[in-house]
Amino acid sequence: MKGRHVDDNRTDAAAPTLAVAPPRTGVLERIRRQGGELSDAMSKVAEQVLADPEAAANATIMDLAELSGTSPGTITRFCRHLGYDGYAALRVAIATETGRASASRESGWDINIGQEIAPDDPLDRVLKQLITIDATMLRDTVDTLDLAAVERVAAAVSAARRVDVYGVGSSAIVARELQMGFYRTGVAAWVWTEVHDALASAALLEEGDVAIAHSHSGTTAETIEMLSEASSQNALTVAVTACPESPLAEIADVCLVSAARRTSHRADLLASRHSELLVVDLVHIAVAQRRFPKTMEALESRARAVVGHRPDHSSSSRQTDRLVRHRSWRHTQAQRSHPSKERTHEEEPARSHHSKPPVHQTTAPRLHRGRPGRDLARRLRHQR
């Protein structure tokens, strides 16, 4: 990835004595993501750990080497590749994560229930499976997301002249959510889901602008082309993807990684949407926090503009009060213009001989400033 943040917790094999702080990301998700970077021997270790994490958490380094068909040296290199200074630190991380899974099972949630959904599963089981999958994805996203990268994106968006958001297919749903979040807070943002329009917009970006591309796989050719064009205009480019080693991530200045797991009945769309929405919601809120006064001003302006069309409970009450006052005013005006014919002479107030006789109004009623709608209604009634 262009300008990618390098994990300071990693060590090189040439410096075996350098102790490192364990990464804060979920260890099992981290192992899954490292699959393509591991040697054949370390891949065997990864497969063994993922196949039975609880056994790995309780095994010695010799036990794990025997179970995986490797050597203690391979186990040590595997730990360092993940950012741990030794097998003891890796065991603690695995034990912590598997302990959390055990707690979930004890509370009634099977951590592995979401791996498959059978065609004849009852809906209550399917519902539990979906909740388990989504909760797992969200937790994995929290563990893997680089908050420093989120802060960098939020700062850039807050200062940008304009922001382009790209996404095609199912990723367009998440792209629209992010653009709408920016729009609500007053950020000049556009969403593009068609390649020709996106390329034309990207060509108009400048240094200081921001382009954010969404692709779960990171291999969508159209999205890569969009972000490449934005990069050529020196805009800050951001990739939101589940694959940090993908071509989209490689050309981006910043990569925001979401987590996703697949089942045979949940394709990429359903498997990734919630974790990606978590990422874009965090970015949107971080931007809103950075430009809080402008955000509040934008929200208030939008609320005033649409209060008559989509009123909430409080504004509906205020609107009702205004209507009641308006009807009362109209009733009073009608009584003044058309006194009751049943009113007797005796009921009329006594007039002195100095009193001026009533004069029928022949001119338009005085207009009230600040109420153009009411003034127009009164004028139209008078002209009848």
Image (tube, rainbow, N blue to C red):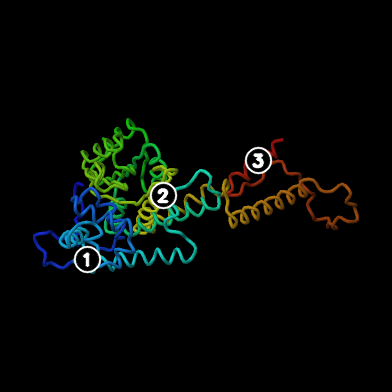
Amino acid carrying mark 2 in the image: Gly
Q: Nearer the viewer, residue 188 or 268?
A: 268
Amino acid carrying mark 1 in the image: Ile
Amino acid carrying mark 3 in the image: Arg
- What is the x, y in percent for residue 35? 25, 50
Residue that label 1 marks: 61
- Seen in the picture, residue 249 relative to 92 is either above or below; the reply is above
The reply to whether discs 3 and 1 touch (Cβ–Cβ < 8 Å) is no
Which residue does the image show at 86% across and 55% down from the upper left?
348
Left or right of residue 71: residue 318: right
Residue that label 3 marks: 379
Q: Which mark is residue 181?
A: 2
Left or right of residue 221: residue 295: right
Mark 2–mark 3 distance (CA, rounded to whole Å): 43 Å
Mark 3, other Cα within 10 Å: few <14 / some 14–19 / many ≥20 = some
Q: Is residue 214 visible?
A: no
Secondary structure beneath dot 3 equals helix
Which residue does the image show at 67% across and 45% down from the upper left?
365
The reply to whether discs 1 and 2 touch (Cβ–Cβ < 8 Å) is no
- What is the x, y in percent for residue 281? 39, 53
Foreground disc of the pair 2, 3: 2
Which residue extends farthest left?
14
